[in-house]
Image: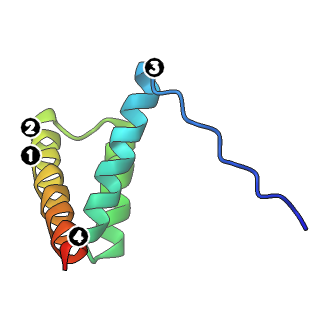
Amino acid sequence: MRKIKRKPQVDYTPYHVRQQAWYMSLLKFYKTIEFNEKAYVDFGEKLLNGKIDQKTLTQLDKLRRKHNELEKQKWEKIKKQ
């Protein structure tokens, strides 16, 4: 039987790695709120090319954090039942 290799832990110390992880979390959240594939791809290209202003990114991050908190509360409620 084959052993399953564990995934190595990501080192979040370098700035570019933290930024890339943040971008990926924004993209993952944007996928949940945007159902048009073309708009999602355009947003992803702009995000990774750095063509989205900081104000928009901040607003999107606030929405993402709020959404994550609501999801966490929902699952905690389900877990308690």
The residue at which mark 4 appears reads as: 75
- Does dot 3 land on a helix, a strand or a loop? loop
Q: Position of residue 71 (x, y in %)?
A: 19, 65
Q: Is residue 44 left or right of residue 8?
A: left
Nearer the observer: mark 3 or 2; the answer is 3
Dot 3, crowdedness within 10 Å: few (<14), some or many (≥20)?
Answer: few
Q: Is residue 61 above or below residue 42?
A: above
Which residue is labeled 2 in the image? 55
Give me the residue at 27% from left, 59% from top: 29
Name the quadrant of the N terminus. Answer: bottom right
Image depth: mark 2 or mark 1 in front: 1
How far is the residue under mark 1 from the one under mark 3? 25 Å
Look at discs 4 and 3 and give the one toward the viewer: 4
Cβ atoms at labels 2 and 1 below 8 Å apart: yes
Left or right: where 51 falls relative to 61: right
- Badge 4 amino acid: Trp
**Residue at which label 3 appears:** 13
> Which residue carries the number 1 mark?
59
**Gap in angstroms between the C-alphas marked 3 and 2:** 25 Å
Q: Secondary structure at mark 1?
A: helix
Q: CA distance from mark 2 to mark 1?
A: 6 Å
Residue 78, image x and y in percent? Answer: 21, 77
Residue 57 in the image: state x and y as whole percent. 17, 42
Residue type of the residue flagged with mark 2: Lys
Q: Considering only order in the chain, which callout, 4 or 1, is on the residue closer to the N terminus?
A: 1
| Cβ atoms at labels 1 and 4 below 8 Å apart | no
Residue drawn at the location 40% of the way across and 20% of the way down: 15
Q: Residues within 10 Å of mark 1 (few under 14, many from 20)?
A: few
